[in-house]
Image: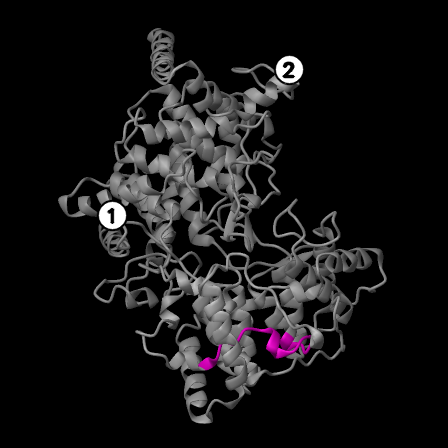
Amino acid sequence: MAHNPVRKVGVKLARLSRVVMRIRAAGPLEGLLRAPKSNVLRMSTRLNEPKAGSVASGPVPSSLQQTIDRAARALMDRQQSDGHFVFELEADATIPAEYVLLVHWLGEAPDLQLEARIGAYLRRIQGGHGGWPLFEGGRLNVSASVKAYFALKMIGDDPGAPHMARARAAILAHGGAACSNVFTRSLLALYGAIPWRSVPVMPVEIMLLPRWFPFHITKISYWARTVLVPLTVLNALRPPARNARGVGIAELFTTPPAQVRHWPKGEHHRFPWSQLFRGIDRVLQVIEPHLPAGPRRRAVAKAVRFTTERLNGVDGLGAIFPAMANSVMMFDALGYRPDHPDRAAARQSVDRLLVIKDDEAYCQPCVSPVWDTALSAHALLEVGGEEALARAAQTLRWLQPRQVLDTVGDWAVARPRLRPGGWAFQYNNPHYPDVDDTAVVLMAMDRAVRGSPLAGSVRYDTALARGVEWVLGMQSRNGGYGAFDADNEYEYLNHIPFSDHGALLDPPTADVTARCVSLLAQLPPRPDRQPALRRALRFLHRTQERDGSWYGRWGMNYIYGTWSALCALAAAGVPPEAPGIERAAQWLESIQNPDFGWGEDGESYKLRYRGYEPAPSTASQTAWALLGLMAAGRVDTAAVERGVRYLQRTQGSDGLWPETRYTATGFPRVFYLRYHGYSKFFPLWALARYRNLKSGSAPMPRIGM
């Protein structure tokens, strides 16, 4: 080990030499101007902190191995008896509020204890501004606030209570309930709180349109498809809520709803598409009540067939709450009795999303067992050792039979000759396997077989072959990958009035593409895979931002995207000295916080984003930054050392990391997520990777993540 200090000095001198050469080539002033600004250096100067190599004040951290051992034990203690992992998946106030309002819309006898617990949850997450944000610490969101207020009033909270008065004042100060988004206005229309003309027309007859038509149900994303189809039936039938308590929210409008003439549009809507589609909507508002009955009956029947074919048992339509809730309401509106098998299964699927604790409860948007299990497997494989590897083997045995091999899902519309072979995100969702989940599962299987003592004990040949075949076939024409569909890039559809959220589509993104690059690069090279790998690499190079980062569609945000891309490029053999990798690594180093962690929040998705804005550090985002920097060959840098010490210092007494901030994304600017598992496996993964790279006791296999 005596040569290590010499090697480290040599590495640092070589890097210093490259920096000096770049500055000289650029000229003194230009070189300084082009150097990325660093949060750590800029703010540490202000705070009179050391600039490198030391740890911020706080408890002395335990040894690295002790930290890893405690975290690994805590993670393994949360493994289910059958080998899988599943952690809570929390969104904002809208889902639990909608659950309460669904019960009263259906006219069910509410569970008063459950309502009291949901009320406690909603009151706890109310923001200091009086309303409800989309993520912890975020700005007031009118739609979330209207639904939360409505639900609390329905539960029985006194409108004159201080928390309700603050909420009402905050909502009115932001324009009132008339400024709600389309999905909120649809719910309010079903409750008779606003006229139906306030909701953009989405006639059920769209189910009869031919595929060549500019709008077709297959041209939008899986989540939009499953939410929209039953909602079109509700929009056609317009069934009123039972609302036995007779609760209304007229006090949340600055102008009586019947007098409102201009309802809001999406902030992303632009000329000329927005004006064109709003004109079409005005025409549809006039003619929709007069559409002939025959085609309407056929369209409703087709919507019902679509829903029942994908009902997915007690796991629900699309395995996501909004689609499940809409399917229950659709069956009710069509006269299905509560004990009808389809309606009963749909209703049960909603209740299975509840998280009920002693003092509060909430409803999840969906569950994430495949994602949680696959990522936990990677963390355990990185930890190594007999027990961790045995636990990883259990996760893979649980995952293997969940591969979708016999259901041809909606993705086949764009890829009709492709065989199934992916994994879904949830326990069951066979019509909608996920490219991202599939790539992560396949990398774990491949790594377990080729890079650990598990090799030879379990065979995943068929699973790997079918999974890789499916991933290759899901590549879009531009070389990138979307999450659930290929070539889902009908961007003009995001400008229809119904799409005020701007998330109607599932286009290729850098983070999902990076995961597929990681997979293809990790696998033993084969000539038939190389063209797809090259196209995906070109997509990543094209989508790198000017500051060196990559956009994160499914995680917050540029830290997540940059981690994903750096891992992919490293696995593909792109050298650390490559300009793209150096720029990305410099960007990550430049945004490290003064406490030596990393953080980013939902404001980074704003349309007028002009560059990174500091946010409080989180354990999961710090782990992503560390994994990205280590993939970029910067394991020996001060930034990485500081980040590791941040994780050591912030580890909780239970071996895990407390993390209440949201670090994941459902729909940018609209819907964010808090994966409770992220702070349990990502920090462990990053620390184990750091230990393995620093020890150098054995050559690391080329791994994609």
Image quadrant for the C terminus?
A: top left
Residue pictured at 37% horizontal, 72% vertical: 216
Residue 275 sits above or below residue 453 on the image: below
Q: Residues within 10 Å of mark 1 (few under 14, many from 20)?
A: some
At label 2, the amino acid type is: Asn
Q: Nearer the viewer, mark 2 or mark 1?
A: 2
Residue pictured at 35% horizontal, 60% vertical: 488
> Where's residue 664, x and y in %?
51, 47
Residue 376 sits above or below residue 249 on the image: above
Could you say which disc has been placed on residue 48 in the image? Answer: 2
Mark 2 touches mark 1? (CB < 8 Å): no
| Residue 660 falls left or right of residue 371 | right
At label 1, the amino acid type is: Arg
Residue 301 sits above or below residue 605 on the image: below
- Location of residue 221 (image quadrant): bottom left
Residue bounds of the magenta highlight: 189-204
Could you say which disc has been placed on residue 459 in the image? Answer: 1
Element class at badge 1: loop
- Location of residue 286 (image quadrant): bottom right
Q: Nearer the viewer, residue 652 or 214?
A: 214
| Residue 525 falls left or right of residue 33 | left
Q: Magenta-highlighted stretch: main secondary structure? A: loop
> Where's residue 513, x and y in %?
33, 47
> Where's residue 564, x and y in %?
39, 40
Residue 687 shows up from this direction: no
Residue 218 shows up from this direction: yes
Residue pictured at 24% horizontal, 52% vertical: 472
> Where's residue 219, x and y in %?
36, 67
Residue pictured at 33% horizontal, 12% vertical: 14
Q: Nearer the viewer, residue 427 or 194?
A: 194
